[in-house]
Amino acid sequence: MLFVTNSSLIENIDYVDLQHLPWKEPASTEISSAAGFIEANTIVSSLAEIQTQHIIPVFAKDSEPLINHVDFIATVQDAVGKCFRGERILQPAIRLSHPIKGRIPEAKTKPAAELLDHERTIYYERMMFAIEIPTIHEDIDGNRINLTIGGVKSYNLDNLFGRKGNDEHFTVFIGFQNKACTNMKVWSDGYVGNLKICSLEELSDVVYMALRSYDAVQHVKRLKQLPNYSLTERQFAQLIGRCRLYNYLPSRHRSGIPPLLFGDQQVGAVCRDYYQDESFCRDADGSVNLWKLLNLFTGANKASYIDAFLPKTLNAAALVDQLQDALDGKSASWYLQ
């Protein structure tokens, strides 16, 4: 069962008319994801800081502004409030990377070391945020997971040398976050990647429909099955060996093998945490269940860059899915052969 504070199951929520009802920003001032949901090459920021201290990039040919980070986050916040009316919705946790620095014209001749704060300009090319709904949660193998919605924006995917009419690229996701470690759990049905949007209105419609179509109950059911499947120590060692081999396989040998996006360093982190992680390490006999294994991979994924984070999150879910099928005897897995 997926728990909701208003005692109604999420599959019984009526979404049909919510889009046209008035809504205001939730009163909660608590920030989502107190610990970092992504860590590598990123800094923590806030809506207020981005809105007041960062400039907005424009299309070079007509100087029209792009949809900025604040408007993207606010659009998703609005859709979340409409779809999950009555729930406790936390403020977004925001991470930024790849700063683009500049200076005002009056300071064009100053040495960099002498620039004053008001003479510097900055915006960040890449941004990821997560909005947590702690009143929609479940417990799996002793770990609480909360429903989480978020998005990724990378200006490097947009044609900044063109005109405003060009599509802008966005990614939106909805899934569950493990509160023991802030690892994100996203399956393909909770991921909308490579959105090409021309306006905020179009973005709002797409995000709203993505939230409406997400089946949280089925997602939780899939997650709750994972502790029932385990790899022996020998199978785990086989999996790790195959993961290390995959990235060195000649392309002609990769046909038919599900891809692996995790590199050697991240696979190494999985090995380390298999022995050392307080929540997801191996059992006394060396076995590890698939719920723990998923968290070992999503934990290693926190060292990914913003633009690689969600694809690797989905890749970890797909890997666990195929391992589950292999343990069920439904199909063979190259990673366990």
Image (cartoon, rainbow, N blue to C red):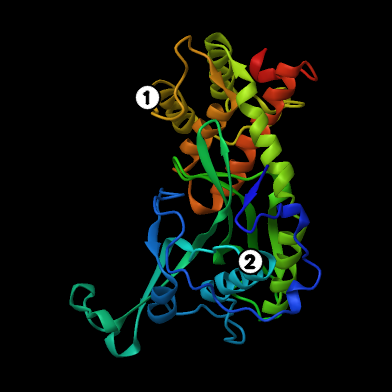
Q: What's the amino acid at mark 2?
A: Val
Badge 2 element: helix
Q: Position of residue 153 (x, y in %)?
A: 57, 63
Q: What's the amino acid at mark 1?
A: Gln
Seen in the picture, residue 311 relative to 195 is either above or below; the reply is above
Q: Residue at x 77, y 26 (%)?
A: 256
The CA distance from mark 1 to mark 2 is 37 Å
Q: Which residue is mark 1?
A: 276
Direction left: furthest residue: 114
Badge 1 element: helix
Which part of the image, by quadrant, shows the C terminus?
top right
Q: Is residue 109 left or right of residue 253?
A: left
Which part of the image, by quadrant, shows the N terminus?
top right
Q: Nearer the viewer, mark 1 or mark 2?
A: 2
The answer to which of marks 1 and 2 sits earlier in the sequence is 2
Q: Is residue 280 left or right of residue 253?
A: left
Q: Position of residue 309 (x, y in %)?
A: 54, 47
Seen in the picture, residue 280 relative to 11 is either above or below; the reply is above
Direction bottom: furthest residue: 106
Tell me where residue 16 sits by quadrant: bottom right
| Numbered circle sitting on residue 80 | 2
Q: Residue at x 55, y 9 (%)?
A: 234
Q: Residues within 10 Å of mark 1 (few under 14, many from 20)?
A: few
Q: Is residue 217 left or right of residue 62?
A: right
Seen in the picture, residue 147 relative to 229 is either above or below; the reply is below
Q: Is residue 279 left or right of residue 202?
A: left
Q: Position of residue 297 (x, y in %)?
A: 52, 33
Q: Position of residue 173 (x, y in %)?
A: 64, 55
Viewer-closest of 303 and 83: 83
Viewer-closest of 207 and 59: 207
